[in-house]
Amino acid sequence: MALNYCSQAPLKRDQTLLFHPTLEEVISEDHPVRVLDELLNGCDFSEWEQHYHGSRGQPPHPPRVLAKVMLYALSRRLRSSRQIEYAVAHNLDFIWLVEGRKFDHSTLCDFRTRFGKELKGLFRQLGKLALTMGLVRLNQITFDGTRVRANNSRHETLTAAGMEERLKQLDQELADYLRECQAADQAEDAQLGPVAPLPVKLAGIKVRQEELKKALETVRALDEDRRKNQNPTPAQLPLTDGDSRVLPNKEGGFAPNYTPLAAVDVHSDFIVGVDVINTPTEHTETMSIVDQIQADFGQRPEQLLADGHHATGQNIAAFENSGTELVSPLPEPPAAASNPAVRADPTQPVPASEWDRLPRNPQSKTLDKSCFTYDAEHDLYYCPLAQPLMYEETKTSSLVGGQTARARVYRCATCAGCPLAEHCVSRTSKGGRTIRRDEFTEHRERHAAKMATPESKATYQKRLHGGEVIFAHIKQVMGLRQFLLRGLDKVNTEWLWTCTSYNMFKLVRYVARLRDQLALATAGEPG
C-alpha cells in the first residue's frame, strides 16, 4: 500500500491557525455531558457556597463546577482524585465541562469529603426533580444491601489477644527507650531545665498505645456481643480502618467490609434512600429508610419490597399501621398437609405410625415448633402426644442488632418417660420441653397469611430486579468494589457521591430520551 494512499492529518502540530474550533464545536450536541451540565445548572448550590468567604484569599473554584466533575467522573469509572486530575487537564469532555479550569488531586480529594451534608441536599434535589418528571413514583420501592470492601487489608486485623500482645510489645519498647535516654535526659535537664519537649519517638509510641487501647475496648465489646449471641469465634478488628468490620464477602470468604444500603424506586430503578452500616444487620434500618424517604420527598412509599431478613417481628409490627405495606417473605413453615401434628383435635395424640413424619428443627434436630398447637382460649400449647404446655413465665430476649422482644414461656411437666422425649427435649435442658410465644407472634401470623396470597407473591417478584440491578451497575460499570476513604462518616459520603452520580445519569438518559421523542414528534410538522 502506497504511503500517500493513507488519510492525512487534518491539523499539523506546528501549524499556526487563524480560526480554531471552539470547545462548543468539539463537544457534539447530543453528548451526555451537556445534559448533565444543564441539569446541575438548575440546582441550588447556595449551601455549598456559604462555606467560602467570598472576598478574602484567592478566588475559589465554584463548588457547582467541582460537583459536576465528581459526578461525571464517577459515571466514567474514574474514582481516584489523581485520575480525575488528569482527565480535567486532557479529556475534551472534562475540559468543556470545567471551561478550561485546572484542579489538582488534593483539591478534588478535599472537596469529595468536605460537603457530605450539602451533597445530601443535592441528592434530594435530583430526587424531587425525578419525582416531578414522573421518573420516580414512590408507589413501590425495594430495599437491600450489599458488601463493599473497606480500605483495609484482610490481613491487617487483630483479635483481643493479638492487641494485648501488641500492647505488651509497646510497653517493652517504651521501657527500653526510656532506659537508653535516661542519662541524656538528665544532662539535658541540667542545661535546659526540667521542661523539655516530648521526644518524637516517645510521642509516637504513646499515640500507638492510645490507639491500641481504644481498639482493644472496641473488640472486647464485640466479643461480648458475640457471647450473647452464642458465637464462640473471637472478633477481629481491622487496624487501618477501625470503623469497618470483618464480614462475609458476597463472593465468599471474610474481609474488612462495609454494608452499603439503597432504597430503589421499582418503576425506574432510581435510588431514593441511601445509608452505610458496618454490620450485617440490614433489617434494623428498614423503617428508618422509609422515614428518611418521607422526610426527603414529602411522600411516604406505598409498599416496601425486601428480602426475608427484613420480615422480623419488630418490622412487621412497626409497618402494620405506618402507611407503608411491607412485602417481605417469612421462612416457609412445614406444609400443613404433610405435618401430622396439624390435626382437628389437638387433645388427641398423633398416632405412633406418624411420628417419623413430624418436622424437625434443622439446627437443634429436635421436634419443630410447628409440632405444637396453640390453644388461644386456654392460653396453652399441646404437644404431639396431646400433653399441655402451661404458661410458666415471661422473659425478655436479646436479638441481633440490639433489639429485644418479650416472650411468654410455656413448659411441659410430663416429659419424663415420654416416648418422644429424646426427639423433643434438648440434651442441655434442665426441665421439660419449652415453647416461646413472643409479643410479635400474631403479627407474623397475619403477615404470613398475607404473603401467601398470589397478589403478594407477584408483587414480591419485582424485588428481584429492582433490588439487585443497581448494585450490579455500581460495582461492574462504575467500578466500586472497594471504598477509597476510611471511617464510617467518610464512607457514607463516598457512597452518597456514587449513588448521586448513578441517579444523575438516570436523569441524563431520561431527558435525552424525551428530547428524541419530541424531535420525532415534531419532525413532520411544518416550520
Image: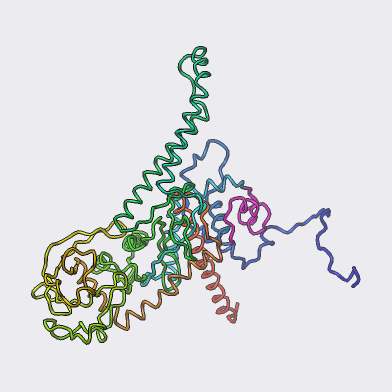
* Magenta-colored stretch includes residue 96: yes
Tell which of 179 and 57 is nearer to you: 179
Q: Is residue 350 above or below residue 279?
A: below
The answer to whether residue 396 is left or right of residue 185 is: left
Left or right, 223 with respect to 510, comes to left
Nearer the observer, 289 or 427? 427
Q: Is residue 46 visible?
A: no
Q: In which quarter of the image is the C terminus?
A: bottom right
Residue 524 drawn at (x, y percent): 59, 82
Find residue 380 and report its horizontal and vertical position in percent: 12, 73
Please say if 178 is above or below 42: above
Image mark count: 0
Q: Which residue is drawn at 14% across and 68% down?
A: 411
Residue furthest front as drawn: 417
Residue bounds of the magenta highlight: 76-102
Tell me, yes or no, whether the highlighted magenta stretch contains residue 167: no
Residue 223 visible in image? yes
The residue at the point 13 percent across, 79 percent down is 386
Q: Is the magenta stretch mostly helix, strand or loop?
A: helix
Tell me the quarter of the picture where residue 23 sits: bottom right
Residue 526 % position (x, y): 59, 80
* Residue at 58% from the left image edge and 53% from the top image edge: 80
